[in-house]
Amino acid sequence: MLLTDLNAPGGIGANCLLLQLDGLNIVIDAGLHPRLTGRAALPRLERLQGLSVDLVFLTHCHLDHVGALPVLLREHPEALLVMTRDTACLYQVMLRNSRTVMERQRAELGVAEYPLFSYRDIAACGRRTIEVVPGHSRHFESARGERLTFTLYASGHIPGAAGILLEHRHRRIFHTGDVLFADTALLDGARFPGGDMDTVIVETTRGATHRSAPRESEMERLLGCIRDTTAHGGSVLIPAFALGRMQELIAVLHAARRDGRLGPLPLYLSGLGIELLNQFDGIARRGGHLRARRKMLRELRAEKLPLHHSPERARPGVYLLSSGMMVESTPSYETAAALLGSARNAICFVGYCDPDTPGGQLRDARHNGQFLFSALGRSVPVRARIEKFDLSSHADREDLLAYTLGRHPRAVVLTHGDPPARAWFRARIGEADPRCHVVDPVPLETVPV
């Protein structure tokens, strides 16, 4: 097998892998880099020119995995798109929202290349889609006569997320995708296949991070922060990814309100999270295993964040808003600017923040220093309580290492992680199984596996 990482900056970004198996050309994911703009945010899709792409697998629909999909399929209309049924209910919502954001950035930031794709391009993706039930194998034969069996397995990361098992000429290749083994308030954890694998392609997001407290206790600590802050007349901002994290926290707040751990409070949400919860409700009604339902919003008396809302003048409440990394001009970014200057308030980070994003910079800001909201043209004193909660939807490194080694692979490919995270996995695998070939691919260089 030949493997090429098309994410030019490396690390966590425009996720996109090309696998070449004896004449089969397979692409796994096609995302946009969250820190880059214009065509620079795309994977290096020009490396696919001259190839006939047989299959494109979508592991899940966070934008760093799905955001470039319409561009890829526009350039390779022969390819078939494979995903779980739940992902098929969600990915076009994410893509339409992404295009809307690009239109705004074109106007506000002058990014002339935006939008990178049209609504017609998004619709065309649906006409090439094969929806797969996790655990059910499917067979594929290319126009050149090469055969492949593939099976998707729920990965627990977000609804619809999946790992991918490829079986080709007696070889078993497993790509974990982004994975969480633990059950959450939203959905069950990963249900991955056993048995030996020839190759495991493994995400390494948390390789440099040791979980210091159980996820359940971190949720309780978050609820305690909300109770304490609002009891003293302050409001709480929780920047959250609109897909997955926001709905999980809605389920947690709903349970806490129902059993008395949290009193009645105003709860404000940003629009995409609400739309996605409606999609989750439809998935659950069709027999899915999601535990967040639309009725929770009614029972919590939650509302969409009003236009021109002033948190300083409103009753103390909870602001559960995207983006999770507080990207400029998003609801969480603008609300942080309003809340940061008062010691009564709290800003709670509940997931990964790239250190170069506003969220990553504010998370590590010095108390009583100044924080520049460049998109708003003003600095605000850092007086609010800044808290970090380890609620990552990525597996603990020890659990992921144990799963990988349990497959007795001949080779392990490291993906989706910064250099220190990959280094931890490389060292631990080397210690446990010196015969295993560990591949940390250099972006844009084709390597045999």
Image (cartoon, rainbow, N blue to C red):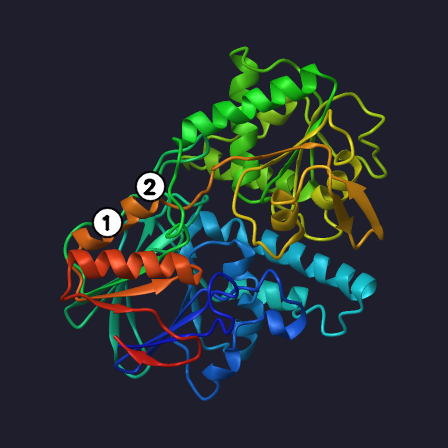
Secondary structure found at label 2: loop
Query: What amino acid type is highlighted by mark number 2?
Result: Phe
Q: Residue at x 60, y 52 (%)?
A: 93
Whether 248 is drawn above or below 117: the answer is: above
Classed neighbour count for the residue bearing mark 2: other residues with Cα under 10 Å, few (<14), some (14–19), many (≥20): many
Secondary structure found at label 1: helix
Query: Percent x, y for residue 109?
Result: 79, 64
- Give the labeled residue for mark 1: 403
Whether 32 is drawn above or below 395: the answer is: below
What distance separates the C-alpha of mark 1 from that of mark 2?
10 Å
Image quarter of the N terminus: bottom left
- The reply to whether discs 1 and 2 touch (Cβ–Cβ < 8 Å) is yes
Residue 406 can be seen in this image: yes
Q: Is residue 92 left or right of residue 191?
A: right
* Quadrant hosting residue 346: top right
* Quadrant hosting residue 112: bottom right
Q: Between 433 and 132, which is closer to the camera in this rendering?
A: 433
Classed neighbour count for the residue bearing mark 1: other residues with Cα under 10 Å, few (<14), some (14–19), many (≥20): some
- Give the labeled residue for mark 2: 181
Image quarter of the C terminus: bottom left
